[in-house]
Amino acid sequence: MSSFRRGPAMASLKLSRLGRPLVIGIRREDPGRIWERRAPITPDDVHEIVSREKAAVEVVACARRVFSDYEYKQAGARIVSRLSPDVDLVVGIKEPPLREVVNLEQGRQEAGHEPQTFLMFSHTHKGQPYNTKLLSRFAAQTHERAPREFNPYPRLIDYELITKEDTGKRTVGFGVYAGLAGVLEGFSSMAHAHLKAGIASPFLYTPRPHTLPTLEHLRSAFRSVGKMIEKNGTPPGLGPVIVGVTGNGQVAKGCLSMLQELPIKFVKPSQLESLVKNRPSHSDFTKIYVCHAQPEDYFRRTDGRSYDRADYYLNPDMYESVFYHKIAPYLTLLFHGAGWSPSFPRLMTKSELIFALEKAARISPHHQKRFTNIADISCDIEGGLEFLTATTTLSSPSYEYRPTPTDSNPTPFLFSPHVEPPVVTMMAVDILPAAIPRDASYHFSQVLRPYILSLIERMREEKAVWEEQGNGAYAKAIAQFANPDSEVRENGNGKREREDPYKSALSRAIIASGGELVGHHTWLQQSVDKVLEERTFRVDPDLVPKPSDGVGEELWAMLAEPQESQRRNVSKKEAVVANDIEEAVTKKASREAASESDDSMEKLSKVLNDIEPSVASSSPATDTGSGAPLGKKKILMFGSGMVAGPAVDYLAQRKDVELVIGSNCLAELQQLSAPYKHVQYRMIDFEKQATYKHLVAETDVVISLLPAAMHPAVAKLCIEMGKHLVTASYVSDAMAELDEEAKSKGVLLLNEIGLDPGIDHLSAQDMIDRIHKDEKSIISFTSFCGGLPALEDSFVPLRYKFSWRPQGVLTAALNTAKYRLDGVDHRVSGDKLLSSPFHNLPITPEFELEGLPNRYSLPYITAYHIRYPVPTFVRGTLRHASSIS
């Protein structure tokens, strides 16, 4: 029986003045989700809400929903073809189509009502790129918010974020039903796979979860399968049937609950080997063995120490999984219900799968291959099970995955080009609870009920503020609700406690309110801004000033005429450099140099376009047809740090390029790819080549934006796979040693093609070539380049802001430098570099710049093909003048 609390007397007095009652709207789920039959609120709970005069309820008619329109009408709801503008709280299961949110938003504003609140599984809070456009309907662009007292944006609350404050565990969800349905789908999928292999088992009679009306019907039918096993056993050709379960949350709880309908016997991981290797008796076939693997069973520290839960969460990088050889080879079927996050070790990688299958083939040669059936209920693509490549549907619940040699670094023992690893059947239905819609909906509505009542109470208070005090006061009211700490009060004993734990939980579950992303969701703003900019603004290339325009000429003319005040206190060393700069920076040369700078990415594009197709196609990896579609080049970019954004933005605009980003930071990958549907990303571990070797094999060009020390390892792999490599880093000794091998394989290792080094090389080489063409000699060469913060943003201790990896910047400041002035070679040790700048460089009269000698300048005399000895040769890095040394 449902129990509902009435609001306090003060709230009732305030609410009695409302001119319009609160209205809840239950959406029809997206028609494209054909199996989505669940309802967030059952007719019983609708009746309680309406009969207690908490709110009116509108329900959008739907013939697919598990509860009929008639049931909702009898409960007191109004059945509508679409939600009206009067709806204050929009409730659904999954995220709505974008057009539905837009229509509701527009209707609401036209009616003059306060913004709506949406309650759903939005799939936005992790930065999911496919739903950033949806999130942008709830959050304003950064520059739009500041001047406004009130933003008419709806509020977004996500079920997935409703948690207990003390444990952080979710309180509203369908996890148990995912486990319950997952067991049935998993056994059904396995039975069909075994039938294809020539073995019929009692599991063929496993009911698929959507085929019976209730959970009890399903349990009864599955119980009958268990009785068949008790009586006749499972086929000897399968050997003892061993089922593995991972996880300790609601999914695992549901799995273990459904498995109780079978004649099960729990076993420990230490018992698996003897169970499989010993000659089985008839009794071994009349039961199902279940191994519920715990983290301590398969995670261990890389230094050999045993698993410690607290240490694991503090130092996940110190742990590795041994599931692939300790547990996996003995399993007939795995139910994977454990969660996974980036930076934590996977349960199994692609390469480990091959080893598991190889071991399974050795220890059980006379039985149907083990570990060839997996039910991944987590549905985390390339997550805990790296080889999960896609999710599935109830219409087509499984697919076959065959490991390939590129998934493994070492050569498999039993598998060779002539002996392929067995196919693994993957069941990964991503809406399993929807297969038991009635029971799942009853459960969900029951746990959601107290939160709905608390939200109704809060929204009625906000509605009173809107109608009586206006939008300014309303904006403050919703901002207060978005702050969980606003619900904290002191009790009579002086202790701080939550006034209403349900309201507090809802506050923590708010993603956006009043047009702003709130709490720890503010990091999503950059992705939202990009989406909104693309929606409302397009740059006309004809409006972009070019160096040849009048403005450009005046700018470069100004740079060529440093003021007299900058010449004071200039040493002989600085005077030589200053004179060279003044003579070099003429209008014409500057315009052309600037053009080269602006065109640097185009030069990189030309390199990509000019690559001989025959070089890539000669690689064995591309013979499989796994590369990009005909006419497109596939680029793999390693790294997702500060310099990756511009590269992604530029390459994503090209229609002839397919871009894949590889990194170990999911949040950065999602931010980079969010604005572009066609940009893909992959989680990889650079310490484990097996996690990205197959990606290199499938690409045409690799761009490495990793720390410079990691480039040689990537280069070696590129040479091995016959793939070209581009980096922005200086050529190290280790990279230089690969030159001959790369040439012999027809592989281009293109380095030093960033800003500095990079753009400075391009402009310098072009200028030098033109001087040589005019049959003139170079007697002095000075080049200064650098990325600096705008002057108004530069007044920080270092007069510098990091635009690339901070460790790299600081390390570069310790490099020894060599250069030549007036025929004398100078050497500056790394510990003295910052205290040895060229002061007062005459580049602009607007502010003072200084230059630091940049590494070893002299080798570039040869690299630039300068024909004669040069008395002065300096390459330097620009910085704002600073007293820091």
Image: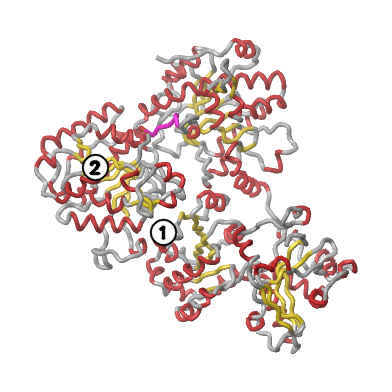
Between disc 2 and disc 1, whose residue precedes? 2
Q: Residues within 10 Å of mark 2 (few under 14, many from 20)?
A: some
Q: Is residue 692 left or right of residue 395?
A: right
Q: Which mark is residue 394?
A: none
Residue drawn 39% across and 14% down?
1
Quadrant of residue 588 within the rendered picture: bottom right
Q: Is residue 630 left or right of residue 193?
A: right
Instruction: Kindly identify the amino acid type of the residue bearing the numbered disc 2.
Output: Lys
How far apart are the alpha carbons under marks 2 and 1? 30 Å
Residue drawn 50% across and 40% down?
123
Q: Which residue is mark 1?
A: 691
Q: Which residue is mark 2?
A: 268
Residues shaded magenta: 170-175
Instruction: Kindly identify the amino acid type of the residue bearing the numbered disc 1.
Output: Thr
Q: Position of residue 83 (x, y in %)?
A: 55, 27
Q: Position of residue 565 (x, y in %)?
A: 89, 66
